């Protein structure tokens, strides 16, 4: 049976201090209590907090100490480690999710939907490609925070030869406590409508602007039921397994995908 052991890391973040955050995360992870895992998921902008100081804080992709740290952690721990980082590349700034593999290679996804209420659309460039990665037989669609509110961008797109594009959806976030109810509901909605598990990791604590974060990191199965759902506001590291065989059995037993609407994204987006 193919299983994906997934570790959610819900933590407080030091404002605009990548060295301190990486050190804190190493200490937080420790040896995971001897627990084996396939995937470690960190929050959005785990190295800096949700900074709009992109010109000062963004790191060049090829020279990024934070990306190098992700690669090192993946190699040392023998698993994928992922989270988003402020990156500058070819003169543009991105909120980039980095998927670091144990072999040193990386996949990346640039956040598509930029949170205009914080001015993110003025400080970062929009991503244009949907990215699906593979791990332990699971195809995983990557997303960042505000993307979660836009179901068309994340929706399974049925094709003539393949019923499902992906088997899990991953979303990393800095989602504030005043909007914790939408975060929780949207994670469950994305799981139910796409017949897939959802991995959602958010931060806790308070940022430099005094904005509080409640966490509510969750691992949700394809039925919308929580496998991990910890108390509000507490830091934690917790691992649970997703079963590909169980997911396929559920999709066969409840084939809602047969009645799905066929569509394509406009202007070549996501192609």
Image (cartoon, rainbow, N blue to C red):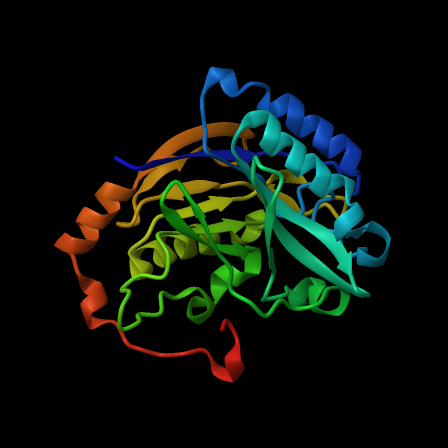
What residue do we see at 36% from left, 61% from top?
A: 165
What residue do we see at 25% from left, 47% from top?
A: 247
Q: Can residue 255 be seen here?
A: yes
Look at the picture and state if 36 lies above or below 87. above
Look at the picture and state if 43 lies above or below 92. above
Could you tell me residue 3's position as x and y percent?
33, 36
Q: Can residue 174 be seen here?
A: no
Q: In this view, does 202 lie to the left or right of 153?
A: right
Look at the picture and state if 67 lies above or below 263. above
What residue do we see at 73% from left, 52% from top?
A: 86
Could you tell me residue 19's position as x and y percent?
79, 33
Look at the picture and state if 242 lies above or below 86. above
Residue furthest bottom in the image: 267
Camera-side residue of 95 and 225? 95
Q: In this view, does 111 lie to the left or right of 150?
A: right
User: Quadrant of the rendered structure where residue 225 is?
Assistant: top left
Could you tell me residue 237's position as x and y percent?
51, 28
Q: In this view, does 49 lie to the left or right of 194?
A: right
Could you tell me residue 90's position as x and y percent?
79, 65
């Amino acid at each position: 049976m193919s299983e994906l052991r997934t570790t959610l890391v819900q933590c407080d973040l030091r404002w605009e201090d990548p060295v301190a955050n990486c050190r804190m995360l190493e200490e937080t992870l420790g040896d995971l209590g001897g627990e084996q895992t396939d995937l470690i998921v960190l929050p959005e902008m785990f190295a800096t907090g949700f900074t709009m100081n992109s010109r000062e804080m963004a790191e060049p992709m090829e020279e990024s100490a934070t990306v190098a740290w992700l690669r090192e952690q993946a190699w040392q721990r023998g698993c994928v480690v992922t989270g988003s980082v402020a990156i500058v590349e070819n003169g543009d700034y991105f909120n980039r999710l980095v998927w670091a593999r144990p072999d040193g290679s990386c996949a990346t996804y640039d956040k598509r939907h930029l949170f205009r209420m914080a001015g993110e659309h003025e400080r970062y460039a929009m991503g244009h490609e949907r990215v699906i990665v593979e791990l332990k037989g699971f195809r995983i669609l990557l997303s960042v925070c505000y993307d979660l509110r836009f179901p068309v961008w994340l929706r399974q797109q049925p094709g003539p030869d393949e019923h499902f594009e992906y088997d899990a959806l991953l979303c990393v976030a800095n989602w504030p406590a005043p909007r914790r109810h939408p975060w929780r509901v949207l994670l469950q909605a994305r799981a139910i409508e796409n017949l897939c598990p959802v991995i959602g990791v958010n931060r806790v604590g308070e940022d430099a602007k005094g904005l509080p974060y409640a966490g509510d990191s969750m691992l949700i199965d394809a039925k919308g039921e929580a496998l991990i759902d910890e108390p509000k506001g507490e830091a934690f590291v917790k691992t649970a397994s997703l079963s590909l065989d169980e997911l396929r059995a559920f999709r066969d037993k409840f084939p809602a995908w047969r009645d799905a609407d066929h569509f394509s994204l406009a202007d070549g987006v996501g192609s």
